Image (cartoon, rainbow, N blue to C red):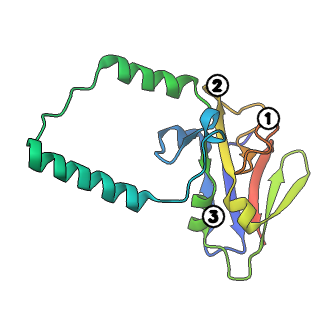
């Protein structure tokens, strides 16, 4: 089985995807909790501003604090989570990097079994591309599994994916 995938077609750039290195990617999400989390609007700027303000206020009233040392157990727990976890990456990062043409409206999910799935570009932007399950790469029916962003197929993801063609 080939582990390299491509996003190509009506795009400015052809994107080469290697899911075997995604475990090191900071954009990865934990699939065991991703679909249960309440989806909130992106308020990262507001959260950052609030956290920075709280930090500033605390330092002004209490003074600077010495950073706490990381406990060995915390590091071990994070390592175990990576080794035994199920992870994916939101697919919109890859679509944005490919820069679809202005008239692009569909994404064809190509599969090794010969069938194709055609979805709207906006639907594809909500995909989560799963790359590991219970700590193992998806060798049998991978290299990636595709989950809809709302989790409707979390028990039965799209498997045997070989590439993505934007039309």
SS class, disc 1: loop
Q: Residue 50, relative to residue 157: is it above or below?
A: below
SS class, disc 3: helix
Which quadrant is the N terminus positioned in?
top right
Residue topped by disc 3: 95
Q: Residue 151, relative to residue 79: is it above or below?
A: below
Residue topped by disc 1: 155
Give the label, 1 or 2, closer to the camera: 1
Measured Cα–Cα span from mark 1 to mark 2: 14 Å
Which quadrant is the C terminus positioned in?
bottom right
Q: Earlier in the sequence, mark 2 or mark 3?
A: 3
Give the camera-side residue of 46 and 150.
46
Give the residue at the far front of this rendering: 61
Give the camera-side residue of 145 and 36.
36
SS class, disc 2: loop
Q: Give residue 9's mark.
A: none
Give the camera-side residue of 166 and 29.
29
Q: Residue at x 12, y 34 (%)?
A: 66
Q: Residue at x 74, y 61 (%)?
A: 123
Measured Cα–Cα span from mark 1 to mark 3: 24 Å
């Amino acid at each position: 089985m080939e582990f390299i995938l491509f996003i190509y077609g009506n795009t400015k750039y052809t994107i080469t995807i290697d899911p075997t290195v995604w475990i090191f990617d900071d954009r990865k999400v934990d699939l065991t909790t991703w679909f249960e989390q309440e989806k909130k609007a992106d308020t990262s700027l507001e959260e950052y501003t609030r956290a920075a303000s709280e930090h500033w206020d605390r330092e002004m009233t209490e003074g600077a604090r010495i950073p706490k040392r990381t406990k060995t157990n915390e590091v071990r727990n994070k390592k175990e989570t990576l080794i035994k976890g199920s992870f994916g990456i939101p697919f919109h990062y890859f679509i944005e990097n490919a820069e679809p043409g202005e008239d692009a409206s569909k994404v064809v999910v190509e599969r090794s079994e010969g069938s194709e799935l055609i979805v709207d570009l906006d639907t594809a932007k909500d995909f989560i591309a799963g790359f590991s399950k219970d700590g193992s790469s998806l060798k049998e029916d991978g290299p990636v599994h595709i989950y809809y962003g709302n989790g409707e197929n979390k028990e039965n993801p799209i498997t045997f994916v070989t590439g993505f063609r934007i039309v």
